[in-house]
Amino acid sequence: MSDTGRTVSIVTQTCVRPERAEDFARWQGETSTVIARFAGFIEQRLTPPKPPLQQDWVILQRFESVDDATRWLASAERQQRIEGVTPMLLGRTDVHLVQDDASAARSSPVTTVISTRVKPGKEAEYRAWEAKIAAAQSKARGLQGYRFEPAIPGVQDDCVAILRFDSEQNMEAWLKSDERRRLIEESAPLVDEFHARTVQSGFEQWFRESTTAGAPLSIWKMDMIVLLTLYPVVFLWSQYVAFPYLGKMSFAISLFVGNTFSVVLTGFMVPWVANRMGWWLAPTGSRALAAHFIGAGLMMAAYALMVLVFWRLY
């Protein structure tokens, strides 16, 4: 493990040509097979774009230490993979090394990654400015965390600031605020290049603790567990609340209230179920193939049982 006891992630953000999205996903799957052979590799996760907030594909590759991550970044195998993907991409690709803080990541629905190329000889002045903007943004509504990663000579030329907010609205309010604009203008003589990209969380945060560190999550399994918990919530809400009490309300309002209740309750139920289905979400050993079929069969049986019970009773 690293000296700090925390893992290290390589976070890559890139824009893919729309017509090459399937090719890129396939390329990334092949890359995961190559990177899995490297010492210290833990896991790889791929998040597709979520317009309008997140326009980029985001690849997170976790390693046990900075040295392990650096060996992958400098490897001939990675360079060969990059050459194969170049025709699929648009614009620049950002690659950052970040010390992990998994608990904070799970609790933050939106994150902004800000890259800054500091002018040579201006490093000390920039760090002083960074302390100033950090103090200002600590008062921003909805800020859940902030981290500054300095440039790593020979590995990462940019400084990286990571801001985590509880909502898109609060994030946008700070990024577009007059106070931040004045501070950014103040830093102009210190930097050569500056830009920000946004990452939005998905279902992964509900499942992270239920799988082993090296096992990627299967989207179809995640969807099946979400459906298992969402169906009874929506059915019972409709039967006991929406129809009897909200029937005279506007359909738009009634639907919004129902969706809010469903999302909140499902947010508690999905992790509970996932933590008990870890043997199926990320099976290991000689019986892994059997676990895939057994788990899927149990899920299908649970669906059928719920439909049958609700059909007979209601």
Image (spheres, helix red, strand yellow):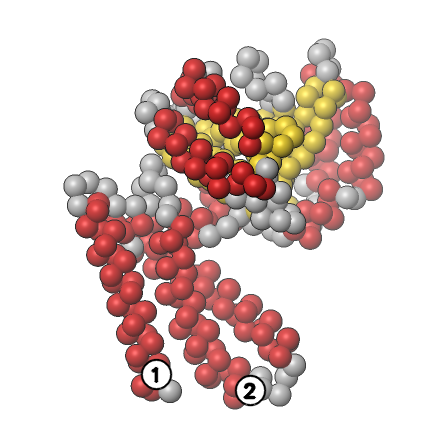
Residue 267: horizontal and vertical position, in percent?
A: 46, 60
Q: Residue at x 62, y 49 (%)?
A: 51
Q: Position of residue 82 (x, y in %)?
A: 50, 23
Which of the marked residues, 2 or 1, is nearer the chain's N terminus?
2
Label 2 belongs to which residue?
A: 245
* Residue at (58, 74) in percent of width and height: 255
For the residue labelled by badge 1, is the local secondary structure a helix, a strand or a loop?
Answer: helix
User: Where in the figure is residue 143, as x and y percent of width and height?
Assistant: 64, 46
Residue at left offset 62%, top offset 32%: 90
Identify the residue position indicated by label 1 in the image. 311
Q: Residue furthest top?
A: 121
> Mark 2, mark 1: which one is toward the viewer?
1
Looking at the picture, does residue 88 appear above or below residue 69? below
Amino acid at circle 2? Tyr
In the displayed structure, 97 sits above or below 177; it is above
Amino acid type, residue under disc 1 in the picture:
Trp
Left or right position of 242 against 251: left
